[in-house]
Image (cartoon, grey):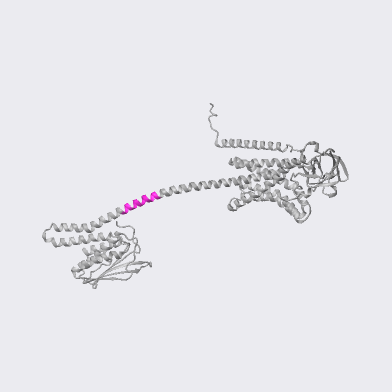
Amino acid sequence: MSEDAAIPAPPGEVRRRLQGSRLLQYVLLQLLIAVVCGFILRQPLPAPPENYAVTEFRLRQGDTERSVTLPHFASARSPADDQPTYTGRFTFPAEQSPRAWSIYLPRFTNAAEVAVNGVVVLDTRRDPVANRPDRSTPQIAVIPSALLHAGSNELTIRVLVWGPISAFLDTPYVGPDNVVRPYYDRRALLFVTLPIVFSAWQAILAVILTIMWVMRRHEPAYGMLAAAMAVGVLQAFLSTPLDESRYATLNSIAIASAPLESGLVLTFGILFFGRKWPRWGLIIFAPSVILAVAGLVGGQASVRSLYLFIGTPTVGLCLMMMALISGNAVLRRQDAASILLGCAVTIVLTSWIHDMLSVLQIVPDRRIFFSRLSYSAMLVAIGAALTWRFARALNQVDSFAGRLVTQVREAEDKLKASFAREEERARAAALARERTRLMRDLHDGLGGQLVSIVALSERGNDASAGIGDAARAALKDLRLVIDSMDDIGGDLMLALGSWRERAMAQLRPHDIELDWQITPPGLPVHPELRPWHVIQIMRLLDEALTNAVKHASARRITVSIETRRGAADLDQGCITIADDGKGFALAPDGEASAEGSAGRGLRNMRSRAARCGAGLDLTSGAGGTRVRLTLPHRFPDSDANG
């Protein structure tokens, strides 16, 4: 292998080669579709047997008369007295059984009046749909038997032309009705029934797409296609006006709205394939505006004249631009919708080119127009594809919703399991904290008392009185710890009731009176109150009571319980313990002036109040000492000193 062959191609070059290959494949596919469509369009439609065809006629137009062979094109002239008139003959067999005979006109432009032996048997102006130049509507009429006679019969066909294209008359067939009518039925199915079916589909899809656009305003492509289909439905059910009234002018403008329909479809293609709306976008609708203004000013004759030179080229230009946009989308997106739309546009463009060559008489043809039929079929295909795409999107949404429900259910189960684990961990942590608190409380209270008992017991019999006091203090602390474990439902008044009994038992040996005062409603209920809050408050109150007994020489101790309105306009409980003892001196910062048991007790009281988020106010003087504990509006969740 050579050194150059071993060097890989740059990514940009590989991408260009891939896009070139895709472009070539797409172009070849469109050429194949165009060739196949052209071959199909050139195939002759089924016709009755040739022995029933009448081809040789004398054409009289104005002051001239000459022999012609049908099918034949005549010049487009508007005066009513200068319409081309074809006169020919057909043979009615003498031995013909009494069967009905009919005359069958496969194609004519714009209207035809048929007479047999001088009597009019068919006037297409009575059929509003038959006179449309863009339709290929066939006509058939039964010839009354009284008009026919054995041998040669005269057939006169007057073609009525109102432009802008030239007059045309296809080969008529005169024969038994049961022979020629099946061919008429086939053409009527193709050029009458099928367009009505397509128009009905367009109307239904226009409603569906309008609803889709109303529900999804951020996708204007649906609204543009719905408008195009609505215009197409309007065109399908309009008839060619035969007078010059104001209504006839508006009717002509509506029939000539094919450029508007093409502009809407082109706009749909631009928006559907995600392209940015160009600055010159409104120019797409300029031809339709020109036709409408010309019709309002000059009447339906102006609309007919301008349509061939403005409307028809605009339709072709829009189709070509749509083909380019579709091809570009195929290269960019490589999706089925782009390929199918591109193929549909190629079919319509091929039919339009075929019709233009027929109108311009560049190729011999029987002037059968297929572009309108293929255009309606394309719109129906696009609308059906979009509806199918919308339904598929709904199915995907339903599937996604089902998966989402399953995932949410699974996540909910996992979340419940996680919550259960977290609750178990929180419960375990709470138990551990409570166990630690209980151990600390027992260590600080009962543990210290037991150490004192042990120390006093080692001194001998002289310490028996101290041992009793220490044992009673230990029992008191144990009761305090046990009482604090009770579930009081956040009502501190229940705990204060037990404390009152212990306080009275403590004061009774010292002949100190306890004055218990409660201002209704007492203390507020605190749902967040925990046992460790209760034990800290009870020990603080015990400390205040013990200080009054040991150091104040008081004869009366008053306990006041009330609820006050705090600074933030919140209810706060307040517990006040006041004695009538001798008091003691306080330092300027509110602490005890001397070190010792009183100083340590005061510091312990402040520490316990801070751990509960409460405020402690101490005043002392000659009239006694007052300790006021102001409870918080909400107790803290954790012990800051724990």
Where's residue 422, x and y in %? 36, 51
Q: Is residue 591 visible?
A: no
Q: Residue furthest left?
A: 461
The answer to whether residue 401 of the structure is visible from this angle is yes
Q: Is residue 345 left or right of residue 441?
A: right
Q: What kind of secondary structure does the magenta stretch mostly adopt?
A: helix
Q: Quadrant of residue 152?
A: top right
Question: Which residue appears farthest toward the front when viewing the image?
Answer: 98
The image shows a total of numbered marks equal to 0
Residue at the limit of the structure toward the bottom, as seen here: 623
What is the quadrant of the C terminus in the image?
A: bottom left
With respect to residue 550, does 281 lie above or below? Answer: above
Among all residues in the image, which is located at the extreme right?
63
- What residue is drawn where x is 68% and y is 36%? 36
Residue 266 screen position, x and y as percent:
65, 47
Magenta stretch encompasses residue 423: yes
For this rendering, which residue is in front, 187 or 11? 187
Indicate left or right for 580 with 105 as reference: left
Image quadrant assignment for residue 597: bottom left
The answer to which of 145 and 527 lies nearer the viewer is 145
Left or right, residue 52 beside residue 626: right
Q: In percent of the image, x 69 and y 42: which residue is there?
A: 349
| 403 sits left or right of 490 in the view | right
Q: Residue 606: horizontal and vertical position, in percent?
A: 28, 63
Task: Give the magenta range.
Answer: 416-430
Whole-percent x, y for residue 465 in the image: 14, 62
Quarter of the view holding residue 530 = bottom left
In the rendered structure, does residue 321 fall within the stretch colored magenta? no
